[in-house]
Amino acid sequence: MSNEIKSITEFDFDLICEYFSLVERQGPGSPEATIKALSFIDNLNENSKIADLGCGTGGQTMVLAQNAPGTITAIDLFPKFIEIFNDNARRLSLHNRVKGITGSMDELPFAKGELDLIWSEGAIYNIGFKKGLSYWKQFLKTGGYLAVTEACWFTPERPDEINRFWVEAYSEIDTIPVKIAQIQEAGYVPVASFILPETCWTDHYFLPQRSSQTEFLKRYPNNKTAEELVANERREVYLYDKYREYYGYVFFICSSR
Ligand code: SAH
């Protein structure tokens, strides 16, 4: 059925993948933030088993692999991201220790108690923070770690425009103390938390998208889906610029008792 007409959603899906495969990161973060989070983790050696969930094309996974011993299995739902991921691992000669596979973070292929560390940057929101924390815990060894970034409010109240945007995009967004309580309720010890610096959004996430947006719109002239996609991303930049004091990403490092 090679000449089958693609459904709109399938086309949208491919387009979103293509847009985000043009940039190194698919979420806010930076090599410095990844290394800082890693500095709180003290249980790793050459035999350690690490999982990176919602890895995208692997921006943070490669930094992790270059700064920690052990093997990493990285999982993402989008096959195209995994293809790019494995090319990147090969290019950096990390392919013996780092492997990307297609799969879902809510159906993990690991054994109970198998993992020393679960990593997940900018991705747990796909299944929700509380669900992710409680489902992932069974795969960690006692004394294993979870390092995860999550969107948080920085103030108890905030302007309506940004409140509405986030409640629609991710209704589980909440303040840092609420997130820490959720970590404890899920049976972890909160080891450390820090707010990602603004450059993780501006320099490492928004800026690389700016040139890809021009390239992407040239590739798909007069295409409504492509135009809407770019308009949405530009709106995110506008909102961040206006309301950055009210929200951001927070790195939480948790230990599994
Ligand atoms: N960690 C990367 C990517 C973050 S974007 C970075 O920080 O750059 C979120 C990623 O989650 C995307 O790559 C998306 O494809 C992936 N994703 C979405 N739903 C998923 C699911 N159910 N299981 C695994 N990955 C998922």
Image (cartoon, helix red, strand yellow):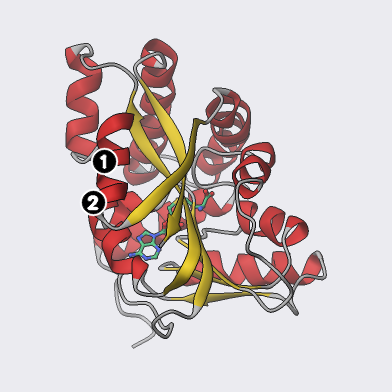
Front residue (pair 135, 172): 135
Q: Residue at x 27, y 58 (%)?
A: 127
Q: Residue at x 40, y 13 (%)?
A: 245
Report if the beta carbon of the residue with label 2 is closer than 8 angstroms to ligand 1: no
Residue 122 lies, in percent from the top left, at 44, 46
Using a 10 Å C-alpha cutoff, classify the residue at mark 2 as few (fewer than 14 neighbours), some (14 to 19) or many (20 or more).
few
Q: Residue at x 57, y 46 (%)?
A: 25
Front residue (pair 37, 170): 37
Residue 252 lies, in percent from the top left, at 45, 43
Mark 2 belongs to which amino acid? Glu
Vertical order, 208 against 108 (above or below): above
Front residue (pair 155, 166): 155
Circle 1 residue: 181
Find out whether the residues at labels 1 and 2 contact each other: C-beta distance under 8 Å. yes
Evaluate whether residue 175 shows in this view.
no
Mark 1 belongs to which amino acid? Ala
Vertical order, 136 against 151 (above or below): below
- Dividing the picture into quadrants, the one containing residue 187 is bottom left
- Dividing the picture into quadrants, the one containing residue 13 is bottom left
Circle 2 residue: 185
Left or right placement of residue 8 versus residue 191 in this view: left
Tag 2, which secondary structure? helix
- Dividing the picture into quadrants, the one containing residue 171 is top left
Image quarter in which the C terminus is found:
bottom left
- Between the residue at mark 1 and the residue at mark 2, the CA separation in whole angstroms equals 6 Å
Marker disc for residue 92: none
